[in-house]
Image: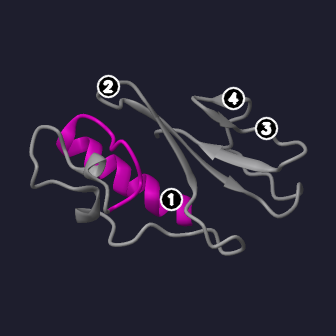
Amino acid sequence: SDLAQIQLALELYFDRCNAYPGSLDLTNPNTTCATNSNIKLGNYITAIPTDPVTKVVYDYSGSGSPVVDYALRAKLETSNQALSDDVDGTQLTLDCSDSPNFYYCVKPK
């Protein structure tokens, strides 16, 4: 559900800016829309959820300038948590392999 919340905010931001933000850091200027500085990622999500185990922000990698593609990654606790919309291999700069790290990655919907 954390990744779904982040994805929804990213899609709403993209709908207004025609690009994704450069990062998920809400204090970073890269989360401000290039075409309208009044639009920020924080308009669509008040806080970026963190991994409940590691307590760190999920991994995000954008591609392009402006950013037109992204990959979002979480580390699963065990291998038997496979989800159907998982993308594998290397996605942008993120390792999304299922073994041995049990990564779960998503791309734009």
| Nearer to the camera, 52 or 5 | 52
Query: Which residues are the magenta region?
Result: 1-26
Which dot, 2 or 1, sits closer to the camera?
Answer: 2
Q: Is residue 99 left or right of residue 41?
A: right
Element class at badge 4: strand
Q: Is residue 46 depicted above or below 16 in this figure?
A: below
Mark 3 or mark 2: whose residue is earlier in sequence: 2
Q: CA distance from mark 3 to mark 2?
A: 26 Å
Residue topped by disc 4: 90
Element class at badge 1: helix
Residue 32: x, y in percent? 21, 49
Residue topped by disc 2: 65
Q: CA distance from mark 1 to mark 3?
A: 20 Å
Residue 40: x, y in percent? 21, 56
Residues under numbered marks 1 and 3 in contact, where contact means CB atoms less than 8 Å apart: no
Mark 4 or mark 1: whose residue is earlier in sequence: 1
Residues under numbered marks 4 and 1 in contact, where contact means CB atoms less than 8 Å apart: no
Mark 2 or mark 4: whose residue is earlier in sequence: 2
Q: CA distance from mark 4 to mark 3?
A: 7 Å
The kind of residue tagged 4 is: Thr
Residue topped by disc 3: 97
Residue topped by disc 1: 4
The residue positioned 82% from the left and 64% from the top of the image is 77
Instruction: Report crowding for label 3: few under 14, some 14 to 19, many 20 or more residues within 10 A (C-alpha).
Output: some
Residue 89: x, y in percent? 74, 29
The kind of residue tagged 3 is: Ser
